[in-house]
Amino acid sequence: GQNIDQPTEMTATEGAIVQINCTYQTSGFNGLFWYQQHAGEAPTFLSYNVLDGLEEKGRFSSFLSRSKGYSYLLLKELQMKDSASYLCAVRTGGGNKLTFGTGTQLKVEL
Amino acid sequence: EAGVTQSPTHLIKTRGQQATLRCSPISGHTSVYWYQQALGLGLQFLLWYDEGEERNRGNFPPRFSGRQFPNYSSELNVNALELEDSALYLCASSLRDRTGNTIYFGEGSWLTVV
């Protein structure tokens, strides 16, 4: 089966940097996604990694190590609007079926 | 360009009734996915349709079913509703199944079963 672990909650200060970790145990790994979800809203796509290494996109970066079954999402220059749930999702096998972690609720404080 | 649209936004049903949720994918997307997000739980994969056919199904009972129409829009039906079916139902779409295609989500339909 598939197993994806993320911390349940994290708190960080406005302007700081925060790293949200995700570990996974899956068969047939075929890419890892990060989504942001504000309460009551749809998940919005942040990043996609299929090869090892770092993908940078503005204030957000995502890293993947396939051999370790590990990814992290790095958020820089935190803003209050970054307070949301961050979802790690793994695609396995062919097709676009994603298995999601339960999400990490990030709270950004002044 | 319009994103994934879902209707209704909110739906209240009584236990034992049937619910029908609708989804229109992003223009040009042929794959549609349905996910359930119950309170406090992660997104659970329900169904995947592509080119009008069911391609994959999650671990849900047969009373969860759906279909995809020729215009690629989709419908999710939940029969014999149970209280634990209360959840946010998210529809997503992507280009035809191909590695690397991003999946885009709609705003979801809140289903409450009383």
Image (cartoon, coloured by chain):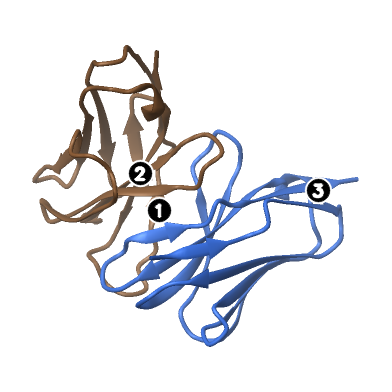
> Quick one: B21 or B69, which is closer to the camera?
B21
Q: CA distance from mark 3 to mark 2?
A: 29 Å
Badge 2 crowding class, 10 Å Cα cut-off, few under 14, some 14 to 19, many 20 or more, is many
Residue A81, located in which quarter of the rendered image? Answer: top right
List x then y, in percent, for residue B101. 35, 68
Chain letter for the blue part: A
The residue beneath circle 3 is A108
Residue A52, located in which quarter of the rendered image? Answer: bottom right
Q: Name the residue type under label 1.
A: Tyr
Q: Is residue A74 visible?
A: yes
Q: Are marks 2 and 1 in contact (CB under 8 Å)?
A: yes
The residue beneath circle 1 is B104
Which label is found at residue B77? Answer: none
Q: Are marks 3 and 2 in contact (CB under 8 Å)?
A: no
Q: Earlier in the sequence, mark 2 or mark 1?
A: 2
Q: Secondary structure at mark 2?
A: loop
For the residues beneath circles 2 and 1, the answer to whether they share a chain is: yes
Looking at the image, is mark 3 or mark 2 nearer the viewer?
Answer: 3
List x then y, in percent, for residue B55. 17, 58
The residue beneath circle 2 is B4
